[in-house]
Amino acid sequence: MLFFDIETTGFSPAQNQIYCIGCGYRSGSDITIELFFAENPAEEKAVLASFFDLLAACETVVTFNGNTFDIPFVRKRAALLFPENSGNEDPFRHTALIDLYREASGMKHLLGLSSCRQKAVETFLGCSREDQYDGGQLIEIYHQYVSRPDAGLLSLLLLHNLEDVRGMFNLFALRSYRQLCDGQFEIIDAFDEPDGGTRSYTVKIQPRFPFPQRVRMVSEGISIFLNRETGLISFPLYHGTLKHYFQDYENYYYLPDEDYAVHKSVGAFVDSAHRKKATKHTCYVKKECDYLCIPLRCTDGFLRREYQDPCTCMALPADPSDLHACLCRYFTTLF
């Protein structure tokens, strides 16, 4: 697995160059970071060649916003500087790609992030940095360095790239929150709590891997509290009659007297005066139960009060394995 980040002289790969590529990887229990730096624009090709040598031995590439910026930029510069390989030699053709910016963006609501910039996410995780400038501010400093090499300027240029690569190792811990939708947790308790005139249903979980930071989110009446080793998810709990809607309503009859739909194979035996062709609004069966509301519009086995409802409901499962599956479905709405 290779973590990498590039520094460029602008945003256009057709007009600007890569002047630094920082790479990080694990060697046993240690982290090794290598920075390939172009002392001048003429050395860009050598920087890319060194990077490609390292990349060839890797199965997975990890970046921060690399799917949008770093990787397309490298591909374009490689096509321009190595025309003999252009068109059939994608340098990333053998690697899986993980973009930590996309990971953070998908978790922004859950984690309460004000921004998904790398420094903001590092702040959430409790990480500190020493660099003073961002990549855009360093472009002019690089031009100054090329004109008049100076150890102080070089230190500023390398420090920012070093911090970006080193920071990604910390950011990788964000992926531990994906345990929720991947089902990598155990339910260790679940209970119904009366609260005045309302009810709530709380589930206590234990993740397979510790979470890096505590998280508290309250949304649409649902509360989530995640500590390092455990989590509490509390849903408003209701009791009532819900409707399960069938999507293939063309194959059903609606029985007004009973107020539910039956398949045509059964409805064919009902007097035609007591049946109607079902519509998407009348093709349902009813169920009275305790249920949890979730902000998820889906069609496979979930319930609604009415067809137009913006969210679906989960009948409170009696079986722990069913409850686990329901929680996974809910967690997918958060990513």
Image (cartoon, rainbow, N blue to C red):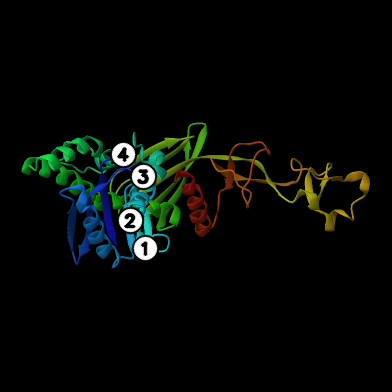
Q: What residue type is labelled 3?
A: Ala
Tag 1's secondary structure? helix
Q: Mark 1 points at which residue?
A: 85
Q: What crowding class fits label 4: few (fewer than 14 Cα within 10 Å), some (14-19), or many (20 or more)?
A: some
Q: Quadrant of the N terminus?
A: bottom left
Give the residue type at disc 2: Ala
Q: What element carries label 3?
A: helix
Q: Which of 75 and 132 is in front in this view?
A: 75
Residue 306 lies left or right of residue 216; in this view the side is right
What's the CA distance linking mark 2 and mark 4?
A: 27 Å
* Mark 2 lies on residue: 78
Q: Nearer the viewer, mark 3 or mark 1?
A: 1
Residue 239: x, y in percent?
60, 40
Q: Would you name the residue on which mark 4 appears?
A: 117
Instruction: Identify the residue at image location x=42%, y=52%.
Output: 180
Query: Are the residues flagged by discs 2 and 4 in contact, CB closer than 8 Å?
Result: no
Q: Which of marks 2 and 1 is nearer the N terminus?
A: 2
First along the sequence among labels 4 and 3: 3
What amino acid is at disc 4? Arg
Secondary structure type for disc 4: loop
Q: Which amino acid does label 1 sit on?
A: Asn
